Image (tube, rainbow, N blue to C red):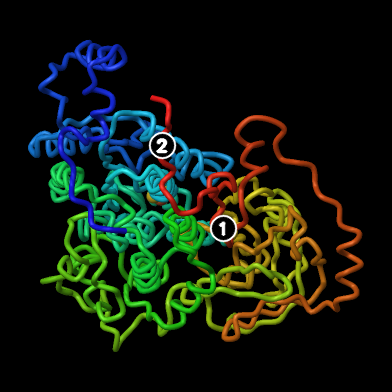
Amino acid sequence: MGESTGKTPETLRSARWFAPDDLRSFGHRSRMMQLGYDEEDFRGKPIIGVLNTWSELNSCHGHFRERAQDVKRGVAQAGGFAVEMPSLSVDESFTKPSSMLYRNMLAMETEEMIRSHPLDGVVLMGGCDKTTPGLVMGALTAGVPMIYLPAGPMLRGHYAGRILGSGSDAWKFWDERRAGNITDEEWLGIQGGIARSVGTCMTMGTASTMTAITDAMGLTLPGASSIPAADSGHQRMSTACGRRIVEMVWEDLGPERIVTDAAVRNAAIVAMATGCSTNAVVHLIAMARRAGVDFTLDDLDELGRTTPLIANVRPAGKEYLMEDFFYAGGLRALMKQIEERLDTSCVTVTGKTLGECLEGAEVYNDDVIRPLSNPVYHEGSLALLRGNLCPDGAVIKPAACDPKFHVHEGPALVFDSYPEMKKAVDDETLDITPDHVMVLRNAGPQGGPGFPEWGMLPIPKALIKQGHRDMLRISDARMSGTSYGACVLHVAPESFVGGALALLRTGDTVRLDLPNRRLDMLVDEEELERRRAAWTPPEPRFERGYGWMFSRHVTQADKGCDFDYLERGFGRAAGEPDIF
Ligand code: FES
């Protein structure tokens, strides 16, 4: 891709709408005047779409109405014209049956909103888990200059002198409540103290992972992903995004020059070093494929084996939260620590190289951001498995599980549905040992439906009462980035479409061999063939609507769960319609 020579007012994309002396452009100009603008407000200026995923049911984005104003201020300062556009607000807490069902809807909406409107560049406002990949995937395909504005993590949780981490402490104290170790009053106190401000989950969950990945790819202002939502620096960063996107339009600095093979690799290395969410696997692959980068599970595993985990941030780290990570220097400081492993020639939204953006970055607390000589875990955050139970792959987070499960063999206890599993784990008389391997199937992209975060299967009450807090669990579901434990996830192909997991039976022996990256059921091939021949597909989950479309077109976890028809023209911006 050659260097662009930049844009002029005549060659702006929006000029197609507003410049010609014809009837259609007359209509566009008169409708802008209807909105209260004179021609000098918008003609010949970069028109910047501020794609805002604010909603009153998205607690993580509660500050986005104000931040959109900050972005618009910056756009105006730089001589552009900003228009705020609402975007699908896929929030993690309230969206059912699964927010993942709607990531692709946001990606489609983003792509189509950009393409169908007179926009020269966009600022993408997201942060709550699926909003980051959804916005980025769509904007990559639309292909106009873009900056990602991450919502920023919320402040640390607090209750009774104790610091609480999003998600992780909810799971932990829920188990204690089930064991009868905390009172209702304490439980209510935790409920009120665990989410104290606007912003995304402040553990290194999916939100912080995905914004870090986007930052490392060069799509945010440098280090923007680490700034807490409630910090005044977040407001200033928002205004700076507005100023910078106008310059990017004049420079014609599009995402095709930023999201290269090397940038995706950088992002994956950074993800491994931060203790990333397992969801990073699915989203990073999907984002890369939209940019034409054929990044695979095997690439991730290779980087996972060679990249130490150095961010001591929960849940993979033992101590700290995102607020501490910011005070310790944030993502720029972490990237500085691993600079020699990164391709620092990559261009970022600043127009500078990554190396230039890391100049002066420093670690202020080397227990939070560790040196390579003292990592939290000697390998990266994720490991990818293969075997007769997961021919197309599965993922596990080794640092977040008890090492005694890294090599484990035990009898399977298989559940076909979440309600069936839930009933069993609440049964105090359940016949189960800590060596058992709990399995949940029909929880993948099609079976869930929508690939829900059910993969951290609750430890059965019968074992909780005996003091056990971890056991080997396997599913074709995902799990929250704030979760932890010996959970094998994303088994592909999923059981709902006849993957090998569908053939497993209660009592079969399952073997996990993490050092050799294997996951197998110890059942001979002839018997598996008999079971395969007897397997019948379940009834479809949806008969109509978006869910029907999702089920017919979603790809499996190892391909990023994008829609198959959106991958046509793999890796190229989809281009402008001929008819205008
Ligand atoms: Fe929004 Fe966790 S619920 S980031």
For ligand 1, tell me if the residue under mark 2 lies within 8 Å: no
- For this rendering, which residue is in front, 442 or 191? 442
**391 left or right of 317 in image:** right
Kind of residue at disc 2: Ser
The residue lying furthest to the bottom in this view is: 373
Q: Considering only order in the chain, which callout, 2 or 1, is on the residue closer to the N terminus?
A: 2
* Cα distance between the residues tagged 1 and 2: 21 Å
Query: Looking at the rendering, which quadrant does residue 323 occupy?
Result: bottom left
Instruction: Give x and y (percent) for residue 79.
Output: 9, 35
Label 2 neighbourhood size at 10 Å, few (<14), some (14-19), many (20+)? many
Q: Is residue 261 above or below residue 510?
A: above
Mark 1 and mark 2 residues within 8 Å of each other at the beta carbon: no
Identify residue for label 2.
89
User: In terms of secondary structure, where does tag 1 sit?
Assistant: loop
Tell me where residue 454 appears, x and y as whole percent. 59, 55
Residue 493 point in image, percent of width and height: 68, 61
Amino acid type for the residue under numbered disc 1: Arg
Identity of the residue drawn at 22% across and 67% down: 354
Location of mark 1 (residue)? 478
In the foreground, 565 or 328: 565
Picture coordinates of residue 60, whole percent (x, y): 34, 43
